[in-house]
Amino acid sequence: MADCSAPAFEIGIATRPSLLATLRSAVPDFWTLTKPEVNFLIVIATFAGFYMGCPVNLHPFPFARLLNALCGTLLVASGTGALNQYLEYRFDARMRRTCRRPVAVGRLRPSTAAWFGALLSVTGAAYLVVAVNALASVLAVLTLTSYLFVYTPLKRKTPLCTLAGAFPGAMPPLIGWAAATGSISSGKAWILYAVLFLWQFPHFMAIAWMYREDYTRAGYLIFPTKGEGSFLALLTLGPSFALFTTSLAVVTANSGGIFQCCATAILGAVLLYYASRQVLLRSRIAARELLKATIVYLPLEFLILALGKS
């Protein structure tokens, strides 16, 4: 008996560090599954919707509800990112941009990503119901389902997928507004939605142009087979100009002062410049500059709107 128990004990001691090391090494992969770079912008947009939705004379400010709204939304968004990588891991493996993702490269099993994503999504939706309100949860779940089951499969069927994806992609301000007020009937909430809806087109068109060979290799129909230059111009310049006018409309609706109006006009003009440059040059460098401009634009514009709240 002694001979049997000693090896078992030694094996247990020996395998514990290996198990811990395995779990520790998997943490970055699970973190990558959540798409943190996307979640950063989602948190900003949700915060903007919540803050803009709260009445000016509301004291004290509901910090606990805000934190709960951000946590719940972040959980659902993280689950959506993980489930998206589960659904597309075979296509991710064909693209240089995504081939090192944990499921695509084989560091995590597809089933692991699926369970992880489902767990985060269900937890986030339930958390929003309990800690915030049902409307915020419904909007978050609607975002998840339309992103995964409408936009994701359409990427391999039609270039109009960008339009379809912009609808769920613009939902975070509405989730924040619903968390703050329990309603999304305000016109200001939908103007915030329109800002984020329009912003996505130049942002994604910049990414799509930079990696269009990758997308083609993976079978994604991001651009039409003919007239990709015209398509690029339509989905870059048109929404950028509409974003310029819509952002000014938000400032006006909030009775913003001269600072908010000027700052919004400058931001919009800069974005239009880089959008026009990309349409004219159609280069990876111009696309990368446009991408940077969109990333800078969104948090600054929401900050301007928050400062001009009335």
Image (cartoon, rainbow, N blue to C red):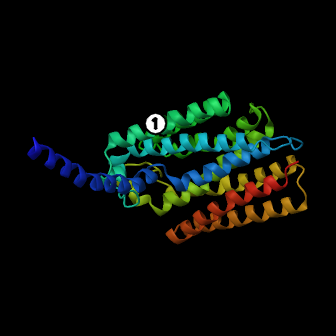
Using the rendered view, name the quadrant where residue 82 is placed: top left
Q: Is residue 142 above or below residue 74?
A: above
Q: Nearer the viewer, residue 10 or 57?
A: 10
SS class, disc 1 = helix
Residue pictured at 60% horizontal, 66% vertical? 292
Task: Residue 294: give x, y in percent of width and height.
Answer: 63, 60
Q: Nearer the viewer, residue 248 or 128?
A: 128
> Residue 73 at x, y = what percent?
60, 41
Image position of 37 (left or right of 192): left
Image quarter (top left, top right, bottom left or bottom right) of the N terminus = top left
Residue 234 visible (yes or no):
no
Residue type of the residue flagged with mark 1: Leu
**In the depicted structure, whether residue 110 falls above or below residue 267:** above
**The residue positioned farthest toward the bottom in the image shown:** 285
Q: Residue furthest front?
A: 2
The residue shown at (56%, 51%) is 39
Image-quadrant location for residue 237 = bottom right
Q: Is residue 293 left or right of residue 99?
A: right
Nearer-the-camera pick, 8 or 170: 8
Residue at the location (35% across, 52% down)? 23
Residue 189 on image: x %, y %: 76, 40
* Residue neighbourhood size for the residue with mark 1, other residues' Cα within 10 Å, grouped as few (<14), some (14–19), many (≥20): some
**x, y percentage for residue 181?**
77, 34
From where the camera sits, is residue 70 visible? yes
Provide the residue designation for mark 1.
119
